[in-house]
């Protein structure tokens, strides 16, 4: 059936589409477009719509996983925003609105990236008056407004209480110090001992025990609360399954129906063996146009790197951009064979390495509103080894980031690049090489290498995420400068890779510090990864002046003097981190992260923050989702229209009302 013409005023064909829609605190909110929507069939659009609804019903899960009081806080904020009868124009109320937006943006009261707690700039007394002037009865239950406020006040306003979502102290108890809602009344030693009993070094297909559960200690002992229908998060999972079943009816083929049925079975049972079956079936599907991610997947938020947060993405294939990623993935064995790591840690046969570029249509859970721009799944090493992995680059999000940046009159590049030549180099090649680095990172980096027999997949514990991201980044950086990229026709010349080297070093040593409060440490895994690589190479290359720190006009800059020697350093560090992972060398991994990835030079940090502040830019970006709306004629759905909202707060209030389950 021919699709109905999309008459939305912000259709993909509009040239005056504005990407940036809101700014507050250190955050900016953007829109992303869904190009090629009208090229999809009605059935594909219906499939995407149902998968999108399934995705949105997981929203309450991520809030609760991030902190056990997040939902109570969020529902109180929602009640005030919807029912407050007092003055909404005063400065105090505007400060309250900023706090509410920050909570929605971060899926809780801790910064989405820095992971430290943020507090309102309005007073606790004013917050009480807001509650008194609003209908918070549904939130309070059998509590009075005063009782609810007394519960919330230290949660929201005490900066020392629940101060960090995920602690990564080198010698402390990170389970006790973390606010993430994965462990209750347990010490780190107790949690580690509980899961150690499941580890069998002879098991070549280990189950990811603990991935989808909360661990709690009661008077009756330690119990595991599994995320499943009939168990923890059961009501949310019922809604997700309802829409997965509807999606199944509109699926493109039997292959999709098979693995959706497995995903439903997993949510019904909580069985991690079924989760592995789903991932094997899902990763084998490279033919379908529409695809999705839905589940408890990434372990970044767990201080022990065991338990996963819930996330979802719905997408379809970007055929034009996929030609490039296919070229990379089809040469996976060449890249593996020529990797600078010990041959013992290389895969003898790269199986099932698939890569594509995608156009995302819905972001949810831990991917909303701040998604990755590339994804490589599944995470289980044995599935990667035996069945391969899916790697994607999200082209419409990358495009939105780039277009939104161009809407700003100020430029981070112009401020922190040392010379006009460097600026021109990065302007000429930067967009291309950044995408290619993402392709190499996701398509090949995460899927490269192998564990030695008997190595515990969880051996690196709290350092696993940082080291894994560094490993993938290094793989991309090393091969981006390889002549193979020219031979394949992926890069235009042998100068292009330098733009990514400049940008990566500049970001790792300076510009990413704009995201961190003065005096704080680097805690987020991706930021630690970038700092680890840049700092290690800077210090190891000092004797040869590979990366030079210099001062010009009172400002600090880092300049690469020898690109080939820097590439060699990337290769050396890649070889060491692969060894650490393959052998499960916790002590060496800890030393790398703690030495190079955590501490910040105070004076440099202060300077970077002052220079960045003068640009009046926001260091973090996130998105509002497009609305996919059924179009009916005579009671029959004849098309699905895409609308592009511009009100961040309104979308989250709508989601809070429509998709609340807990």
Image (cartoon, rainbow, N blue to C red):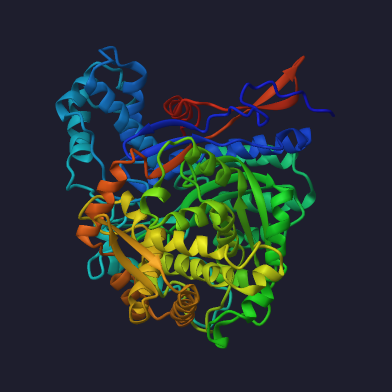
Residue 513, x across and y down, in percent: 32, 54
For residue 27, what is the image quadrant? Answer: top left
Residue 528, x across and y down, in percent: 36, 63
Residue 88, x across and y down, in percent: 29, 16
Is 492 placed above or below 107 here? below
* 347 lies left or right of 72: right
Q: How many marks?
A: 0
* 149 lies left or right of 461: left
The reply to whether residue 572 is in sight is yes
Quadrant where the N terminus is found in the figure: top right
The residue shown at (47%, 41%) is 405
Residue 164, x across and y down, in percent: 27, 52
* 414 lies left or right of 152: right
Quadrant where the C terminus is found in the figure: top left
Is 472 placed above or below 589 here? above
In the foreground, 122 or 454: 122
In the foreground, 305 or 641: 641
The reply to whether residue 350 is in sight is no
The residue shown at (55%, 65%) is 497
Is 334 placed above or below 145 here? below
């Amino acid at each position: 059936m021919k699709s109905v013409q999309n008459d939305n005023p912000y259709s993909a064909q509009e040239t005056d589409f504005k990407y940036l829609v809101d700014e507050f605190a250190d955050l900016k909110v953007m829109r992303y477009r869904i190009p090629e929507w009208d090229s999809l069939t009605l059935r594909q659009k219906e499939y995407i719509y149902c998968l999108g609804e399934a995705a949105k019903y997981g929203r309450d899960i991520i809030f609760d996983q991030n902190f056990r009081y997040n939902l109570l806080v969020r529902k109180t904020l929602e009640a005030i925003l919807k029912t407050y009868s007092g003055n909404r124009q005063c400065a105090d109320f505007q400060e309250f609105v900023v706090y509410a937006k920050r909570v929605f943006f971060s899926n809780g009261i801790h910064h989405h990236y820095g992971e430290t707690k943020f507090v309102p700039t309005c007073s606790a007394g004013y917050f009480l008056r807001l509650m008194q002037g609003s209908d918070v009865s549904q939130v309070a239950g059998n509590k009075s407004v005063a009782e609810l406020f007394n519960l919330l006040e230290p949660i929201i306003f005490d900066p020392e209480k629940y101060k960090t979502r995920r602690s990564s102290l080198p010698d402390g108890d990170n389970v006790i110090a973390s606010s993430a809602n994965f462990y209750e009344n347990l010490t780190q030693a107790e949690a580690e001992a509980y899961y150690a009993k499941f580890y069998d070094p002879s098991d070549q297909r280990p189950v990811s025990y603990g991935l989808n559960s909360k661990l709690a200690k009661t008077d009756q002992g330690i119990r595991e609360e599994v995320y499943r229908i009939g168990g923890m998060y059961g009501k949310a999972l019922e809604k997700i399954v309802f829409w997965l079943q509807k999606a199944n009816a509109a699926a493109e083929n039997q292959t999709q129906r098979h693995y959706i049925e497995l995903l439903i079975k997993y949510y019904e049972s909580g069985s991690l063996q079924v989760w592995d079956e789903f991932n094997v079936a899902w990763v084998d599907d490279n033919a379908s146009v529409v695809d999705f991610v839905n589940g408890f997947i990434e372990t970044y938020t767990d201080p022990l790197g065991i338990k996963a947060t819930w996330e979802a993405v719905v997408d379809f294939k970007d055929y034009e951009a996929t030609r490039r990623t296919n070229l990379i993935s089809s040469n996976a064995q060449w890249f593996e064979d020529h990797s600078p790591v010990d041959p013992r840690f290389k895969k003898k046969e790269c199986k099932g390495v698939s890569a594509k570029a995608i156009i995302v249509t819905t972001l949810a859970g831990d991917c909303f509103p701040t998604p990755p721009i590339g994804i490589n799944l599944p995470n289980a090493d044995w599935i990667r080894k035996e069945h391969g992995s899916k790697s994607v680059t999200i082209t419409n999000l990358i495009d939105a980031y780039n277009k939104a940046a161009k809407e700003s009159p100020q430029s981070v590049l112009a401020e922190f690049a040392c010379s006009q030549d460097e600026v021109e180099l990065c302007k000429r090649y930067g967009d291309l090489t950044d995408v290619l680095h993402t392709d190499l990172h996701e398509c090949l980096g995460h899927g490269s290498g192998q564990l030695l027999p008997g190595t515990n997949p969880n051996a690196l514990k709290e350092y696993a995420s940082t080291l894994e991201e560094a490993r993938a980044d290094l793989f991309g950086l090393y091969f981006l400068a390889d002549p193979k990229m020219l031979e394949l026709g992926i890069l235009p010349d042998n100068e292009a890779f330098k733009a990514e080297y400049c940008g990566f070093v500049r970001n790792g040593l300076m510009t990413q510090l704009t995201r961190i409060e003065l005096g704080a440490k680097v805690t987020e895994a991706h930021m630690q990864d970038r700092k680890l690589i840049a700092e290690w190479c800077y210090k190891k290359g000092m004797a040869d002046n590979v990366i030079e720190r210099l001062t010009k006009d009172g400002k600090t800059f880092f300049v690469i003097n020898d690109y080939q020697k820097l590439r060699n350093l990337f290769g050396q560090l890649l070889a060491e981190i692969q060894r650490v992972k393959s052998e499960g060398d916790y002590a060496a991994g800890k030393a790398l992260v703690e030495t190079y990835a955590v501490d910040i030079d105070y004076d440099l940090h202060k300077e970077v923050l002052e220079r960045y502040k003068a640009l009046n830019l926001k260091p973090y970006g996130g998105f509002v989702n497009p609305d996919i709306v059924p179009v009916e004629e005579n009671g029959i759905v004849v098309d699905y229209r895409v609308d592009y909202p511009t009100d961040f707060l309104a979308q989250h209030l709508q989601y809070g009302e429509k998709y609340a389950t807990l």
